[in-house]
Structures are given as structure tokens and as C-alpha cells.
Amino acid sequence: MSQKDPGPGALAGLVVLDLSRILAGPTCTQILGDLGAEVIKIERPGRGDDTRGWGPPFLRDEKGNETAESAYYLSSNRNKASVAIDLASEDGQRLIADLAAKADILVENFKVGDLKRRGLDYATLKAINPKLIYCSISGFGQTGPYAHRAGYDFLIQGMGGIMSLTGFPDEEGGTETKCGVGIADVMCGMYATVSILAALNHRHATGEGQQIDISLLDAQVSWLINQGAGYLVSGKVPGRLGNGHPTIVPYETFPGADQSFILAVGNDSQFRKFCAVAGAPELAEDPRFAKNADRVRNRKELIPIIRRLTIEKDAADWIAELEAAGVPCGPVNDLGQVFDDPQVKSRGMRITLPHPLSGTVDLIGSPINLEKTPVSYRTAPPLLGADTANVLARHLGLTPETLADFAERGILGLKSPTEEENNA
């Protein structure tokens, strides 16, 4: 799906200086970009964001050859301009400070203390731009005994508890399991986005910016949600339930004759309807199973009974009959089935943008739907350094001669890679 021009977005006119890489920070800044902000992505000359090399898969050019643009990098960097600046050099640091002086928002995910050594910490930049909203994303936060440690999604999923809740129980041959996507990073990026929008509203009222301290671990602990609250209330450490739910039964995958499907019974009325469709109305009258709390307490007795029923018919038949009866259910789709799903298509969750190497590139759309100021998909994730000259000339007034001098000294990466240079 491509998109007609939706007009200025809700954040049009704001400038975001993006000093982040990997996934949490880029997720945040991509959301801001989708909402209309101008996002200037600062990358290392010659190398760029680490995720550019996190493949395969890599995007293929129009001749079918692999490029250096990984799918991972493409996932979270649209609507951005790539500016290649050497942050290790004093001149590069001054250029960043000059850009920060004109920016509304800065997002960074350097190790704690790294930017202070380069004169790019909040206290220094606040002195030249009091309105700057400065969002620091780190593994463990700017304070505390772990502040100096590096944090990665997999590590945080383990330390933050979600892995202890994910996977099948030991007695079923299971083990603790991470989520199949970098959900700790993504959720941290979303919390960062919410924080930035809150800080913007505060700035509207007061004219002052502020620093935001977001950590992967804090974000991970915060979205333990009902499981975390359940532990705090009961004092009992929850175990792994596979696809089951800790406080709703039946609410998991069940075997059909051909493949598994999802049964998500959310209340007692739905359970009665399921039992009628399954030809076992007596289960809904059984005092062990009549109420959800009883079904939770007696799940070990109930689940095997339901599995013996569901194995008698194909998953598609179950889904058709249960949907007709008003019982929530559905398939377990692979990603091919997801992007072919008519609902996913109708909601515009697969988008297509022009790309200088491949002609076009397909990406995942935004779930944000605003009536007056919809998101926009303006540019594909940029090639490394593709926008260095344009951004620095436009924002800082640098001349072609100055740009060329900086490039010759390795401070800037001016030219976007050619197709041949992008071959992985």
C-alpha cells in the first residue's frame, strides 16, 4: 500500500536530533517522524547504525543483488535523514552541538557518561538551548548500581522477568524463552515517545525543556502488568504456562484435527457458548468449571477435556462455528498469513515506499490513526550519509567548501553509498 499526501503531521515543524541506534531509540524517533517531525539521524561515517549489518536478510537491488541495507535497519528508520558525523572528533562534536542548539528534541542511547565527555550532555546543551527536550535511553538508567552497564533486549528480557513467564513448564519439556521480537526495546521506545510528548506539552505551558531518563529495565518491569501485580499482591512467584493465561481459562491454543487454533474465552457466558458448540453443555454446569475462578483453580482437569474435544475437527471448522456463536477464537498465523490477511491489508499495515537501490521497499505501517493529523510515510530509511550535505547546509549554513574540507578530514561522510558499494 502506498499513501497519498496526508498533509502536515501533528508534529510538523519540530526538529528531532537522533543520536540513537539499534532499536529502542530508533523506534521512538520513527514514531516522531511518522507524526511529522523532521528527524536527523546522526551516524558514524563509513559504518552507521549497528543494525545496518544485522542480516541477512538484506534488501536486494533492482538486479536482485544483496545490498548493505538490512531488514532490521529498515524496520525502524523511515522518515529520517542520515547525517554522517564523526562524534570522536572535536569538530564533529561542535557540529552536533550546533544542531542541538536549533533542535526541539534530542534522543540518545549512549552509555552513561559518554556524551558528557564529548560536551554533548544535557547540562551543556541546556545552556545553549533551554527549550531542548533531551531524552536519554539506556539499559539501566542514569542512576543506580547498574547505570554503567550496557543493556541489550535479550539481557533485559531475562533480568526484567518476562522470560521467567514465557515458555512451557518444566514438566512439559519447556524452558524459559524470550519473545521472538525485541519487545523490551520496542516498549522502551514507546515509553520514550510518550515521555517526549508529555515534555512537549510542559514546554508549551512553560517554555522550558527538560531531561528524560528512560531505561530498558524500568520499561520491562513496568509491563509485567498483571503478572507483576499478581506477585506483589500474593507474594507467589508465577510459573510458566505455555500459551495459557494465569487468570483466565480456557484461554490458550488447542489442537484441531489438522492444526492448532486459539480459544480465548473471556467470561462465563462465552464458556457456556463454547460448551454448546463443542457438544458438551454439561461442562458449563459442572461446579468445577462453571465460573472462571473455578476453571482457573481446576485448569489441570479442564484443559485435557477440552483438548479431547477440539482434536475431533479441523481448526477452520472450529473457528467458523465458534465465531458464529460469538466465542472469541482465531488462527495462529505465520507472517506470510499475517500480511495476506484482509483485515491487515485493509488497515494499511503493509506500506510501500520508493528506495534508491531496490526501486521500492515494503515496510510495516504505523498503527496510529489520527483523524485530523494522520501519520505520513515520506521517505524510506536513508542510505548512510545520504543527507549530510543537505541538512548541514540548511540548518547550519555550511558552504560546499566547508563540507568538502570536513569530508576530506574524515569528520563527515558526505556521499551516500553507490549501488555497488552497498553490496553486502
Image (cartoon, helix red, strand yellow):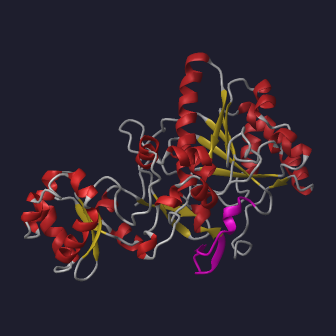
In the image, residue 295 lies at what x, y percent?
Answer: 23, 57
In the image, residue 313 lies at what x, y percent?
Answer: 16, 79
How many numbered callouts? 0
Magenta segment includes 62: yes
Magenta segment includes 301: no
Relative depth, front residue between 84 and 136? 136
Q: Name the image quarter holding residue 398.
A: top right
Q: What residue is at 68 percent from the left and 42 percent from the top?
A: 141
In the rendered structure, the answer to whether residue 140 lies left or right of residue 346 reads right
Q: Which residues are magenta?
A: 48-68
Relative depth, front residue between 47 and 111? 111
Q: Is residue 226 above or below residue 353?
A: above
Relative depth, front residue between 94 and 290? 290
Q: What residue is at 34 percent from the left and 58 percent from the top?
A: 245
In the image, residue 412 lies at what x, y percent?
Answer: 83, 53
Q: Name the image quarter holding residue 239.
A: bottom left
Q: Is residue 101 above or below residue 82?
A: above
Q: Quadrant of the N terminus?
A: bottom left
